[in-house]
Image (cartoon, coloured by chain):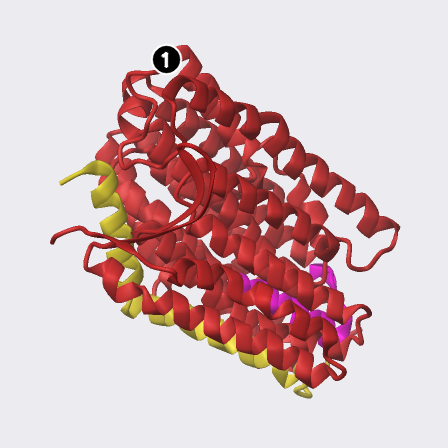
Chain colours: A red, B yellow
Amino acid sequence: MSMETILSVKPLFAVLVSLVAIPGIVSSRSQNIREAWTFGAAAIKLLLVLSMLPLVLDGNVLTFTLVQVLPDIGITFKVDAFGLLFAIVASSLWIVTSIYSIGYMRSLNEHSQTRYFSFFAVAISATIGVAFSANLLTLYLFYEMLSLATFPLVTHHQDKEARSSGRKYLFYILGGSIGLVLPAMMITYHFTGTLDFAAQGVMAGHINSGLALLLTVMFLFGFAKVGIMPMHSWLPAAMVAPTPVSALLHAVAVVKVGAFSVVRVFTGIVGTTLLSDFGINGIVCVLASITIVVASLIALSQDELKRRLAFSTIGQLSYIVLGIALLTKSGMTGGMLHIAMHAFGKITLFFCAGAIFCATGIKYISKMKGIGRRMPITMTAFLIGSLSVVGFPPCGGFISKWYLVLGTVESGNIAFLFVLLGSSFLNAAYFFRFSTMLFSAAKRR
Amino acid sequence: MFENKIDEAPLWCVVPLVITASISVLLFFYPQPFLKLASLAVQTIMGG
């Protein structure tokens, strides 16, 4: 397979298409036209992203430089296999979330729908921008753009709880990126002279072990969207947002941008050789394992459905980090696949939580007994989403967990195998006990 | 608590969750597009 770098404007168009739709969304006089703009932009974005698939599968890389900021750093896009995988997930789920948003926002007669759909469009542009970033500076700019665009979505209800959650959200997300990622990026540039993502990283030969460990930890905690403990508590707080926001942004776009950024920096900046030689990957594996187990245990005790899903997400994101940090082929494949497989399963669960709220106004699990009899389609979908997130066949989650488990075996560290298996049992406990309850009859007095 | 009467959320809410649940199952039987992309990415990073 010959690898070629192809100059193409498609990555730029894929990023811009949802931004171009915003004037249409804002100026629309009717709900139908506004939603048509949203849906149209989502469809064009997906088609643009999919049109790059054959070239990338042939081993090619598409690039485009928008502007040269410094002599050797530009706002540059690069579409490779990993970036395209993430872009396909985000853009395909934007379409279904757009449809869901229409139903949810209309049925609850939510206020400020134009603002909602506009910032949604900015958020998805930023997500694709992160996916197609060719260097750390471009990734950082789109990462921050996503943080700012999602703040009005998190605080959509504009009440005291929403404002408080919004402040927490910004504190963790912007605090992490400005306080940790930005200085780590500058130090990296100072020592290596580049911020471009390279196949084997750029730090090797330029940075000693202590500094490499420090920078890795700064990136890991700084990209707080990935929710490694103790940088996780913004995520349950952000569940105050309308459910479509929780669904796309907190099952797909925001949290997966965190995971994606960590993977990009670990592989493209730090480099797998350096991670392995200095034993940094072992520390990352331990941090990810702690997050997986603790988040799964906390999820067990949550009565509010969206908060249970939020803690589940925190644990599942660390599966991705663990898979990459194992530094085995299967582990890395599993980690990357989990971005896609978890997204489809978890968004289904969020959609179901929102559908239950739309139909009944109920948010708490303890009040949902027997709801499966009233909402059989929704609750069957919930069961399928649960199966996928837990990693049971016949669902996509099984495939990614299969590779993750193989990765732990290949790494020779059986402790991480037990972390994966043990947390899967916990996942099963907090989803299946709940699923059974939903279909059981309520006790008669 | 709930009567046996079927009363789902609006269709605009139900259709997307049916689609994503179906894709979750489909990805078990046909994971190839994502699997190929992930394998390509890993091959680039790890070499070989």
Q: Secondary structure at mark 1?
A: helix
Q: Is residue A110 left or right of residue A40?
A: right
Taking the magenta stretch, the answer to whether it contains residue A322 is no
Looking at the rendering, which quadrant does residue A106 occupy? bottom right
User: At 33% from the left edge and 19% from the top edge, which residue is drawn?
Assistant: A279
Residue A221 visible in image: yes
Residue A135 against residue A277 in the figure, above or below: below
Across and down, in percent, residue A151 comes to: 71, 50
> Who is closer to the viewer here, A439 or A343?
A343
| Near-viewer residue (A361 or A414) | A361
Q: Nearer the viewer, residue A186 or A302?
A: A186
Q: How many marks?
A: 1
Quadrant of the drawing holding the N terminus of chain A: bottom left
User: Which residue is rendered at x = 61% and y = 38% of the image?
Assistant: A232
Crowding at mark 1 (Cα within 10 Å: few <14, some 14-19, many 20+): some
Position in image of residue A74 (x %, y %):
44, 40
Residue drawn where x is 48% and y is 42% of the image: A138
Magenta range: A347-367
Give amino acid for label 1: Ser
Q: Quadrant of residue A30?
A: bottom right
Question: Quadrant of the image for the C terminus of chain A?
Answer: bottom right
Q: Position of residue A216 (x, y in %)?
A: 45, 25
- The picture quadrant where one finds residue A382 is bottom right
Location of residue A190 with respect to A437 vertically, above or below: above
Picture coordinates of residue A101 (x, y %)? 65, 72
Residue at coordinates 36% horizontally, 62% vertically from top-left?
A396
| Chain of the residue where label 1 is placed in the rendered structure | A
Q: Is residue A32 left or right of residue A425?
A: right
Is A363 included in the stretch rendered in magenta? Answer: yes
Which residue is disc 1 drawn over?
Answer: A209
